[in-house]
Amino acid sequence: MIQLLLHLLGDFILQSEPMAAGKRGSSFWAGFHALVYALPFWLLGPSWAAWSLICGSHFVIDRWGLARRVIWAKNLGFGLWPKWLCRKIGSGNAVGTEDGTQREDPWKNECERFAWRNCKATGYPKDLEPWLAATLLIVADNTLHLLVNWSCLRWL
């Protein structure tokens, strides 16, 4: 429970507007935020390695928006099936139907929908409700941070 409270303190209460606005585009702001974020964890008396990894991982996750990539990979079955599926099934623009007519291949649209260029803002396709995509991104981002923090405090 204390780890969750320290995470909330560091990531929400102590994060200033310039940190929040600048951390994705600036290593300075991402680093400054990561340092401020990690300071409260000293209350737990972690090892130097655990604290450093909490701070460093926070920098990496926030600076490069790794939660977006985790979401995108998850939606693509970790990259295993869609590429193969898009090549095999979605290679044509049309598919035949039982009555002999042609219709557009539904997989072609799905493969385009999940292309990184259409998902890079949140990890979700652009057609997902913006409020839902943003909420799910925040949850995924915080889950990543909490998993890393717990692992560091548990095993280092």
Image (cartoon, rainbow, N blue to C red):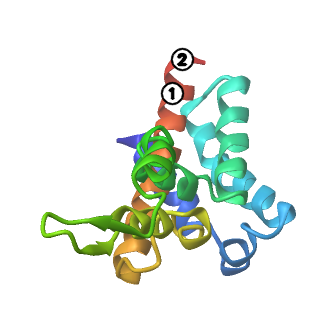
Q: Which mark is residue 139?
A: none
**Dots 1 and 2: beta carbons under 8 Å?**
yes
* Residue at (41% x, 43% y) in the render: 77
Please name the amino acid that badge 2 sits on.
Trp
Q: Few, some or many C-alpha atoms within 10 Å of disc 2 (few <14, some 14-19, many ≥20)? A: few
Apparent side of residue 34 relative to residue 148 in the rendered image (left or right): right
Q: Which residue is mark 2?
A: 155
Q: Which residue corresponds to the image point at 29% horizontal and 75% vertical from the top-left?
A: 103
Instruction: Note whether 69 is above or below 45 in the view shown.
Output: below
Residue most toward the left?
Answer: 99
Residue occupying image coordinates x 13% and y 63%: 98
The image shows residue 74 at horizontal and vertical percentages of: 43, 47
Q: Establish if 149 lies above or below 139.
A: above
Q: Where does the N terminus fall, quadrant-wise?
A: top left
Q: CA distance from mark 1 to mark 2?
A: 6 Å
In the rendered image, which residue does mark 1 sit on?
A: 151
- Residue ranking furthest to the right: 28
Residue 34 x %, y %: 71, 53
